[in-house]
Amino acid sequence: MESITHPLTLACAALLLAVASWWVVIDSLRQPHPRPLLPGAAFTAGVLGSLALSHAALLGPPRFSTGGGHLLLATLLSLAGGTAGAFLLSRARGLLPAALLLAVGAVTAHLALNTAHGPSYSIPALALLTLTFWLALRLLPCAPPALRLPDRTRRWLASLIAGGTLTLTSLQAEPPLPPGGRQDFTSLLALVAACALLLLYLQLLVTLRRGGIAFWRLLAAIVAAEVGIMFLLPALIPQASPGWLEPLADGLLLALFLVPVLLQERRIGAELEDARREAEATLGSIGEGVLVTDARGRVRTLNRTAEGLLGISAEAALGRPVAGVFRLRSAPDHSPLPCPVEVCLQERTAGSGADVLLEDGAGGLLAVEYSVAPVLDRSGEARGVTLVFRDVTQRQAVQLRLRQEKELQEVVNRLLSQRLDGLDLERLLETALESTLSLSWLSLESRGGIFLREEDGSLRLRAQRGLSAQVRANCARIEPGYCLCGRAAETGRLVHKPRLDEEHRFRHPGMDDHGHYCVPLVSEDRIVGVLVLYLPAGHQEDAWEKEALGTLARTLAALIERKRVGDAQRLAADVIRYGRQGVMVTDPETRILEVNPAFTVVTGYQPAEVLGRTPRIFKSGRHDKAFYRQMWQTLEREGVWQGEIWNRRKDGTVYPEWLAISAIHDAGGRVQNYVGVFTDLSALEQAERRIEDLAYVDTLTGLANRTRLQDHLQHALARARREAEGLALLFVDLDRFKAINDTLGHGVGDEVLREIGRRLTGSLREEDLAARLGGDEFVVLLPAGERGEVMSQARHVAEKLLDAIAAPLRAGEQEFHLSASIGIALFPDDADTAEDLLQYADATMYQAKRGEPGSYRFFSRSLNEGLQRRLVMERALRRAIERDELEVVYQPKVLLEDGVLSGAEALLRWHSTEFGEVSPMEFIPIAEESALILDLGFWVLEEVCRRKREWVRAGLCKDIDGSHIAVNVAARQLQSPGFVEQAARILDRHGLEPGEIQLELTETGLMQRQETMRGTLEALKEAGFTLAIDDFGTGYSSLARLKHFPIDLIKIDRAFVRDIATDPNDAAIVRATLEMATALGIPVCAEGVEDEAQIAFLRRYGCRYAQGWYFGRPITAVGMEESLMERLAV
């Protein structure tokens, strides 16, 4: 069959196909993640196609007897074999199976192209050209090693291969095989040469498998193998037809030549994979985020650090636009910033940025800094961008903290550098407060204050900035434990409140618009004050702020102490001069330079007798040389020595003293003086013994005090339990003893108590114990005895005590006839603990006093039930305010002349959830005895002021005479510290004048501690309050005595008003009271008015006001408001 085209054209086509497959292999292997499947398939197809075209060019088209199907099947089989080989290579299943499959495919295709069922033609003379062309094709295995060469070298290599192939295909030479297809291989030397060539090939294969081979050595191996096979096959198969021999040689050569190719490709692929893994490991270990994009700005690679910072996995990020992954915002205003990667791609220049914020995957912002650089190709075009970025949030926080610490240290240094001489304490505190508020990084408002702690534990405002006048007035002095400042001072811990604490005692407008830092000022574990700083409302607690404020507080506390010490140093000379401790000053050679008067008192030496001499004159002889040597060694080493030492006075007596010696150094560190301060321990030991006696003895009466009583009672109870015996406890209280103190003074009262103590002691056995608890309260302990005899013994002793107390007693210029009430509790019949015995005896004594003064009573179970009820009621009363169980009602007060409403008296009612409606006669005494009256009193005053403000705003109090709401005040309230200021603050908080509220106190309460009461009433009067005496006539006082008090109104007790129309005595008392009050200019209000006869009597004798059921029962606040509205309507 004739050739269908020019042989040279087909040869060129074969060359182009080979070169094309070669470049596919190169480009595939140069990809970032090469897959051997594509280059293997391309290489196989290129080789087979080149073989087919070369044979068509040299031998002509093949002849087929079975049609084109055989050719198609052979082609498919060859492609399948090549693809399977490449797949096995890509799966790293071994080089040998891949090479064999590739060889099978090549042989099958070659046979299909040349013959259908066997050799049908002989090799033409142009077979040499075919072999030469195959040789050119087999240069292709040199392509993988050439990949390591620079780009320019690869281009020259490709040109060389192409030109060499064209040159070789044009050569004409005799074929290495004779026309007959056979050659007698009788020369042993030729056979050895052929085998040597093949061995050379195998040796180079081993070298290639171990680590690569040079390009020209590989080319030499290819040529050696081809020549060896071409000469070896005819010798081994002398009878073979050339038509079969040539394809067989081609298949073997192709298999042998593919082996180095596949080995090289596998080695290079492994090296690339190792390099890729190494690069990934390196990027993964870097503490900075690394992101690489392609030329279109899409993510190609990012490391683990970048995944963590961006909040996205590598799989999710790959292929996404970088602008959607790396989003930046400006630090000041959080506005979006352009993506630096896109800018880098556009401008093809590197860049960097700092102090920017990066959005993480969770919606948060991180402070980062970054750098970007383009990846350029040979033409200068950007193939991608490498972005490196790091989280600098912590570094910025550290830098910010360092700046803040520096600023804080500057403030501390500025405070510590203050010259305290001549600088008053207030100015020092103002400077400290200004310096604290100047720290801009603290979340503070420009308001605050500094409180210093007083001796009684209260806090006094000493410096402030930005506080309103009302706050300054309310917080001028804060009681211990009250408000936020008090709690900080009490606990010694910083208090942070983002808003006003509900327990805050004072209220004023604007209190809810800020929070507080209350920082205790602590110096050497002693609270010296509190620093108060205002915060924005809702401020979150910050540990660094608290630490900084703690540093400032400690500095300020140290300054305050230094200031106080500096002030105290001005008194040091006086202390030394007039102190009770002996002081001696010497020079470095221990010659005495100065002594104080106490030195002379202790030692007996006059200053002139010791000045210039050494302390050796005081040696007692009781210490050896080692003692003094150790003393001086300690003094030289530590600068101070203290301890007990025996010295000798001038008169020769030896005495113990506690001596402290300090070395005073000059600026150069040299000892300038020694100062010794000593105390005569002999006097101290006597004082300690005296103090020990005083700790257990009542100093006024010489009886045992509460401490000794508790000690004896515990021991007596232990013995009684051990011996199964009983004991008795007698609680003795003098009747109406308070009147002696109030009328004749405490001097007479103390004399009476001393005499009572002597009488108690004289009435008891030696084993009995009498103790004074305080005031006029005494306790007698009858120790353990037979249980059957304890009660009779207690009765006998109680009667003796009552008789002894009832005997006439003379004190001062007065003679007294006293009585006492005694309560008796027994162990174990009534109680088995010391606390219960005292409590039951006390309660029993009050029962005796209320029943029949001057008597004694034994504790009873019924009394116990009453006591238990009282205790339970006291606990319930403490919770009544928070449970909203209390209510204020109003008893109307009218003008008698026309019956017009003039005011009202506020009365407290308790609607208990446990006891129901509780009478004031029951719960008010409980409140007064347990100090609950203080809280209840202020609550009532607060509630009345709140209601009064509402009525005033509604215009309901216009043109009403007096328009007072009277509030009852207990004596205990008046005696409590700060009562006047607290009451004034409550009225001021509700916008009321003090004159709009009248304070009522009972006559009995007024007579207690008259001097103290007079001062309190005068302070209330000066503040603007009006004062009324309630229950007048029940306290055994007189108007002559009341005229010394600033009273605005007298209220006659209902007990005298009730029978004025029928009882001449009551009528006379009321009439005399009205006449004397009128003469003194004090108006009178009658309580308990119930009928017309009483009204007529009161009007006739000039009573101005009245209240009682005749005019109306106590009404609620709503009812009072309606009454005021009715008054205005009339």
Image (cartoon, helix red, strand yellow):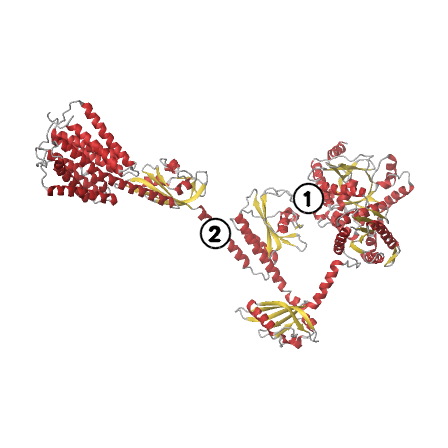
- Asked if residue 1122 can be seen in this view, the reply is yes
Q: Nearer the viewer, mark 2 or mark 1?
A: 2
For label 2, the SS is helix
Please name the residue shown 15% across and 24% down the image: 64
Residue assigned mark 1: 988
Residue 487 position, x and y percent, is 63, 49
Residue 44 position, x and y percent, is 22, 33
The residues bearing labels 2 and 1 have C-alpha atoms spaced at a distance of 46 Å
Please name the residue shown 65% across and 73% down the image: 622
Instruction: Report whether 97 appears left or right of 440.
Output: left
Compared with residue 1119, is residue 450 higher up or lower down, i.e. above or below?
A: below
Instruction: Report whether 318 appears left or right of 737.
Output: left
- Asked if residue 163 can be seen in this view, the reply is no
| Quadrant of the frame with the N terminus | top left
Pick whichever, 7 or 898, lies toward us: 7
The amino acid sitting under disc 1 is Asp
Q: Tell me which label, 2 or 1, sits earlier in the chain.
A: 2
Please name the residue shown 12% across and 31% down the image: 241
Q: Which mark is residue 403?
A: 2
Compared with residue 584, is residue 311 higher up or lower down, i.e. above or below?
A: above
Pick whichever, 839 or 588, lies toward us: 839
